[in-house]
Amino acid sequence: MFKRLNEIEGHTVTVNIEGADVQVPEGETVAAAALVHHLGYTRTTPISGAHRSPLCMMGVCFECLMEIDGLANQQACQVQVKNGMIIRRQQGVGGTDA
């Protein structure tokens, strides 16, 4: 599906995506990291539970909402990765323990 055009060069950080520690380039967005690491989908819709993934990659569509470091409803395409970040798919509206 998605792959890097070039090998990773320069500084990397370690993030945890759905329980797996992965190395990503410093400065990459969470959405790009999720796509490259074959997450498949980043959230489910609140009503039907349909799988959704990043679309516009510029903060307009809100399809990339994820749980980042325990905070739900984060626009993954607008957040840069940081070392030790914990990234999870968002289920439904997020932020609920239902």
Image (tube, rainbow, N blue to C red):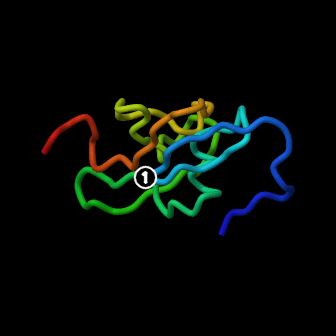
Instruction: Work out which quarter of the rendered image holds the N terminus and state it.
Output: bottom right
Task: In this rendered view, identify the residue nearer to me: 96 or 70.
Answer: 70
Residue 2 sits in quarter: bottom right
- The three-letter amino acid code for the residue at tag 1 is Glu
Residue 38 sits in quarter: bottom right
Residue shown at 34% from the left, 62% from the top? 50
Residue 81 rendering spot, x and y as whole percentages: 61, 34
Q: Is residue 60 above or below residue 24?
A: above
Task: In this rendered view, identify the residue nearer to me: 48 or 9.
Answer: 9
Residue shown at 57% from the left, 31% from the top? 79
Mark 1, residue position: 18
Task: In this rendered view, identify the residue nearer to me: 76 or 49.
Answer: 76
Residue shown at 44% from the left, 57% from the top? 52
Task: In this rendered view, identify the residue nearer to me: 66 or 6.
Answer: 6
Task: Estimate how packed mark 1 is, as few (under 14), some (14 to 19) or many (20 or more) residues with alpha carbons within 10 Å.
Answer: few
Instruction: Work out which quarter of the rendered image holds the C terminus and state it.
Output: top left
Horizontal relation, residue 85 to residue 35: left or right = left
Element under label 1? loop
Horizontal relation, residue 13 to residue 30: left or right = right
Residue extending farthest to the bottom is: 1
Residue 3 rendering spot, x and y as whole percentages: 73, 62
Residue extending farthest to the left is: 98
Residue 59 sits in quarter: top right
Please give the count of numbered marks on the rendered protein: 1
